[in-house]
Amino acid sequence: MNVTQEVVTDLLPIYFSGEASGDTKVLVEDYFRQDPDFERIARNAATPLETLRAATPIAADPEKEKRDLESVRWGLRRRQWLFAGSLFLTLFPLSYYFTFTHGHLVSLTVRDTLWNAAFHWSLAVVFWFLYFARLRRRTVSLAVAISFTLIPIPFVLHSVFAGEPVLWFAVFWVWAAVAWIGHFRQRHC
C-alpha cells in the first residue's frame, strides 16, 4: 500500500498526542524514514504542543479574581436594569390607552398620547439594543449620548408647535451631556 503525505499529515495529531495505535505509529515512522525532511517539519510543528503540555499552570491572583468577579456581578446587574427599563418603556405607553373606570376597562384614544408613546418606544428601542448588543462600556456611553441627544428633537418640535411645555425634555439633554462627558473622560481601551 502506497501511503501519501496527506494521509500521514492527517495522522500526525494522534501520533504526537500519544493516542495512536501501534499500527499507526509504525506507519508514520516508516514514512518518516522515507522522507526525513517531512519528519523534521512535522516534529518542529509539534514542538509548540509539547511545550504547552509541559508548561505549569499559572496560579491566579486572588485580587484579580475578586475584581473579575465584581466586574461580572456589575455586568449582570447592569443587564437586569437594562431589561427592567426596556420592559417598562415598552409597556408604559399602553397605560395611556386603557384605564379602569367603575370596574370596567375603558379605552382612551387621545391623539397626543401617540407622541408620548412614540417617545417612550424610541427610548425602549435604545434600551433593548443596549441589552442585546453586549457592547463595550465606551461604546455604550457613545450610543446613550447620541440617542439622548437626538431622540428628543422631534418631540420637542412637536411640543413647541402644539404649545405644550418642553422643559421636561431638558432632563434627557442633561443625561446626554453626562453621557458625552463620561464618554470623553474614559480612557481609550
Image (cartoon, grey):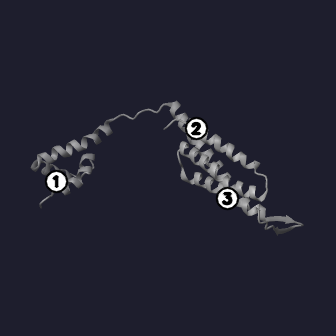
- SS for tag 3? helix
Circle number at residue 121 = 3
Q: Is residue 7 left or right of residue 123?
A: left
- Which one is in front, 134 or 77? 134
Picture residue at 36% right of the left edge, 34% below the top: 56
Exactly how many numbered labels are in the figure? Answer: 3
**Amino acid type, mark 1:** Leu
Q: Dots 1 and 3: beta carbons under 8 Å?
A: no
Quadrant housing residue 98: bottom right
**Amino acid type, mark 2:** Glu
Give the residue pinned by disc 1. Answer: 27
Quadrant housing residue 122: bottom right
Give the residue pinned by disc 2. Answer: 70
Circle number at residue 124 = none
Q: Is residue 84 left or right of residue 98?
A: left
- Which one is in front, 113 or 5? 113
Which badge, 2 or 1, is on the more N-terminal residue?
1
* Residue 150 locus on image (x, y percent): 63, 51
Which class describes the residues within 10 Å of circle 2: few (<14), some (14-19), or many (20+)?
A: few
Instruction: Please name which of the two marks, 1 or 3, marks the residue nearer to the observer.
Output: 3
* Residue 93 locus on image (x, y percent): 73, 60
Q: Is residue 60 left or right of residue 119?
A: left
Instruction: Please name which of the two marks, 3 or 2, marks the residue nearer to the observer.
Output: 3
Picture residue at 57% right of the left edge, 35% below the top: 185
Quadrant housing residue 104: bottom right
- Which one is in front, 16 or 62? 62
Q: CA distance from mark 1 to mark 3?
A: 68 Å
